[in-house]
Structure formats: structure tokens, C-alpha cells
Image (tube, helix red, strand yellow):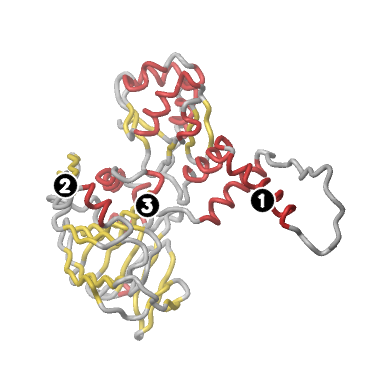
Amino acid sequence: MALSLTVSAMSTFTLANVSIDDFLAKHWQQQPLVIRGGFEHFADPLSPDELAGLACEEQIESRLVYRRGGEWQAEHGPFDSYERLGERDWTLIVQAANHWVPEVAELVKPFAFLPKWRLDDVMISYATPGGGVGPHIDRYDVFICQGSGRRRWRVGARGPHREFAAHAALLHCDPFEPIIDVELLPGDILYLPPGFPHDGVTLEASMSFSVGFRSKSPSELVSALADHLLDKELGNELLSDPGRPAHRQQGRIDATDFARLRAQMQAMLDDEAVLADAVGAMLSRNKCELDLQPLQEPYTSAELLEYWRQAPLLRIGGLRCFYVDATVAAGVCYIDGSRYNFGPACHGAVLALCDNDELDYAALAPWLEQPELVQALAQWVNRGYWYFDD
């Protein structure tokens, strides 16, 4: 089954020539895949000049990568000029462009067969002929969507590839034999799982849109749990061991004591509500700035409901809204790192809120008699998390 999506600003996206089930079974986190014409009639959602405008902003993460005298160079933005770089061999990269440009955020929707908590961001690169960032290995999954122009990609097999710092801000890998050597045209997609070395070189001035998906490491998960326990003052009970036998070797942590200590930690991992709150808060927290535009004249709850009847609410790009199976029946959700509990009566409202980027009044109407929910909605709109498209 192909996945298609009609978007008025950008024609029709079609993830074609591969079924979603086959892709997930044979390629996701396993093998690279070239999807020819993956986006039908693709048009760049913004121009190179507009991308350069984003790179002028202090709060938006951007980089320039180029070579000078045969050596790789990298600079972090903001940038206000590119004339010194000439007409060849440089690349401008902007991270989390989906947070700032609604048309770029639309690129995420065709990949809704993957959970939103895995989404990292949409990175955009503009490159002049010969431009690229060098051979490297990513630790995340990425769909590289070719926009205007042409770019040649070489992909190697997984293996023990040596990595080294070509520059303080550039980690490269040694040359590799390609298992894929392809020229991407507008609308083509290259999917890369983690661990495959790859190198893209621009053949003519071009735009690329990389939709990245990243999981979490055990250290990140344990750290998030520890932070949550400290913040909420949980897990402070000390080890209790009445009736223990006399200890004979003072320097020894014996197997029984070690098992007791491990059981203390395991008890926290086995507490689904505690773990859900820790993971929900971590996964909903944004690593990059959001394009928040707080209202100068905040809505009251009544004003919000009245206006909402006339126009849908749209979620800003990049806002992370999740629920966890362990706590959703209690009406709990996690938005931008914060936990909200609306009670079991709002279970359905939480599903509608987190599952949809656009909220019609009718979608939440059954729960709008719940004052805490309506107050939170007004708070979020006033803060700039959701907005009316005027």
C-alpha cells in the first residue's frame, strides 16, 4: 500500500513503489533503499533565499560546511553573507526547519507510519556544485528527500569503518566501497538506516530535505528517570534489611546485598506510572527552539471556544505531544516536557489532542464541559503552542 497525502501548498506527496509493510519488514533499520519519485511533483517548500533567512536567526541552529585549501571547514550560524564562499563547494545546513516553516512541517506527514516520538527534525541543506559534508556515518534513520537540483549519493555497507575528526565540528569516516551509487532527482528519496557510511556530492545547486528519526540510548533513559525521581522527590526510601547475619569480610559487597540494591532500582523500573511520567516528559521535550508567538491579548476560555467554532486550531511545527499506554486511561498527556492530568473523563480528548496536528471544535466538543481541559487549551493557545490560521 502506497501512502499518499494531498497538500495544497505542495501538490501531492506519494510514497510509492514500496508497501509500508514491506518497507518496515525489509528495510527499516536494516537496509538502505532508493525510492524513485517518492514525492510526486515535488516542489521545494521554501527557496534558498528563505533558507538563508532562517540561518540569519540566532535561535535557529545552522552550519556552513566547505573546503579551503583542501581542508574541511565548518562554522556555526547565524550567517548574514555567503559571498566569500564563491560559487562552488559549500553547503548551508539548517536544523529543525519544520519548527519554523509550516510547509516544511508538512514533509513529516507522509511518514506517519512511524511513531512521532521517534521524529528528530527536518534538516534542510542547500549546496552549490561540488558541495557536501564529506563521508560520514549517522546514528539515526533518515529519509533524504531530494528537492530542486541533482545530488550524487554513495552508500557503503555497515562495518568497522574508522571515524575521525576532519574538523572539530565534522566527524568523517574512511573511504568505502559503495553498495549504492545513485543520482537523486527532484522527488527521489534515499532511506538510510543507522550505521551505513554515505557521502553526497551536489552536481548542481540543489536543496535536500532530510526527515530524521532518532531513538534513545539506555544512558539517556536512565538519566531521564533519575532526573524525574530527583525532581519529584521519589525513590528516597533507604535499604531495609532487618535480621541480616553478621558480616565477616568488611570490604565485600556480597551477592545478597547486591541483589537488594538491584531490587531497589528495579522497583522504580517496574513502577509503570513513574516510568511513564519520566519517559513521557523526556520524549515530549524539544531539543530545538520552537516558533512560539504568544498572544499579546490572551483569550479567555469563553473567547477561545467562540472563535474555535469558526476555525480549526493548528499545532505549531515541532511541538511534541504524547501519551503513554500506562497512564492515558487516567487522562494524562505530555506536552513539551510537561505532564498534564485531566482525569479519566478526558481520555478521548487526550487521544484527539495528541494524535492530530489540526483540531476542529467538533473533535473535542464531547469534552469541552471539562473546565480544566478548556483552561489548559486557552493557556496553550495564549502561549503559542496552537494557533488559528488567520
Q: Which residue lies at the image location 33% right of the left edge and 68% below the top edge?
A: 196
Residue under numbered circle 3: 121
As measured in the structure, the alpha-carbon distance from the residue carrying label 2 to the one carrying label 1 is: 50 Å
Whether residue 298 is situated above or below residue 162 in the rendered picture: above
Residue under numbered circle 1: 262
Q: Quadrant of the N terminus?
A: top left
The mark that comes first in sequence, 3 or 1, is: 3
Q: Which residue lies at the image location 30% right of the left edge and 55% below the top edge?
A: 28
The mark that comes first in sequence, 2 or 1, is: 2
Q: Which residue lies at the image location 33% right of the left edge and 35% below the top edge?
A: 357
Local secondary structure at mark 2: strand
Q: Which residue lies at the image location 43% right of the left edge and 37% below the top edge?
A: 321
Number of numbered tags placed on the structure image:
3
Residue under numbered circle 2: 14
Residue 190 horizontal side relative to residue 54, left or right = left
The local crowd at label 2, few if under 14, some if 14 to 19, many if 20 or more residues have their Cα within 10 Å, is: some
Snapshot quadrant of residue 386: top left
The mark that comes first in sequence, 3 or 2, is: 2
Q: Nearer the viewer, mark 3 or mark 2?
A: 2
Image position, residue 66 (x, y; %): 34, 75
Foreground of the two, 241 or 205: 241
